Every structure is written in C-alpha cells, then in structure tokens.
Amino acid sequence: MYNNILVPVAVDHGPQLDDVIALARKLRAEGGSITVLTVAEAIPPYVAQYLAADQEAQTREAIRADLAGDLQDAPDVEIRVVTGHAGITIVDYAETHDIDCIVMQSHRPGLKDYFLGSTAARVVRHAPCSVHVLR
C-alpha cells in the first residue's frame, strides 16, 4: 500500500479517469492521499506576447474547474494543475512531493511515440517511485 499516490491526467482526459482513480484508491494505504495532476504546456513566448498577462493562470483555473467537475464524486482527491512539459514535470513533482506511487493511463502508441516516446514511457524510466500504468 502507498501513502502518497500521484495520478497524472491529460488535459483532454477521457472516461477512463474513473478507472485510474479506482485503482489508486485500491493501492492507497489507510490515511494516504491521492493527488490528480494535470500538466498544461507552457504558452510559447512568441504567442504569449499577444495574450492577456494572466492567460496561463486563467487556463490553469479552467482546467482545474473541469477536473473538479469530473471528480465531484471524489472528495478524497486533491487536484493540482501546473505548467510545464508533461513527462519532466510529473517526475519532478513526484520527487519534490514525496510521492511513493504514480498511477497513470497509457494510450495505444502511435508512430510519433516510437520516435519521441510517450509520457508514460518517460515517467516509467525516470520516476523515483513505483509506477502503475493502465492500458
């Protein structure tokens, strides 16, 4: 059983979110925590100059509100939305927040994944803790 479980989800998460949360709950130790993390890609500077100064903050809040709606039946789950590169940021978050298990959804790999690698593959290779990948 794990005390601090991280559940990274994509901005465009699908209906499988319930399955991932259910597995995280099964793996959670009594008194443990589950954090759902979404990583929004940073807006490139050449685009950001044409947007409102607080556009990234507004985007993060909109993502958080969407997740809160999808997780309204999960009051035991904490929601975090951060900006960065998904694979790197998930691993960094796990390192800095004493996460002992990551539970994440994978997708069927496409041609791009064979050349660049998927987020799940990067997390599995670099995470400082156990990683459970649902397919």
Image (cartoon, rainbow, N blue to C red):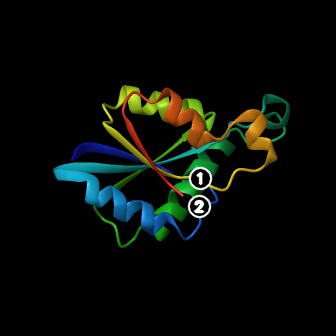
Residue 77 x %, y %: 33, 57
The image quadrant that residue 115 belongs to is top right
Name the one closer to the observer, 127 or 13.
Answer: 127
Instruction: Using the numbered discs, state the Cα–Cα distance from disc 1 to disc 2 in whole angstroms.
Output: 5 Å
Q: Residue at x 84, y 39 (%)?
A: 50
Q: Which residue is mark 1?
A: 10
Is 83 or 54 nearer to us in this picture? 83
Q: The residue under label 1 is which amino acid type?
A: Ala
Q: Secondary structure at mark 1?
A: loop
Judge left or right: residue 103 versus residue 108. left
Mark 2 lies on a secondary structure that is loop
- Residue in the picture at 64% in, 50% down: 59
Q: Is 126 above or below relative to 27?
A: above
Query: x and y percent of residue 52 in the render?
Result: 74, 43
Q: Which residue is mark 2?
A: 13
Residue 68: x %, y % from top left? 45, 64
Q: Quadrant of the C terminus?
A: bottom right
Q: Is residue 21 left or right of residue 135?
A: left
The reply to whether dot 1 and dot 2 touch (C-beta < 8 Å) is: yes
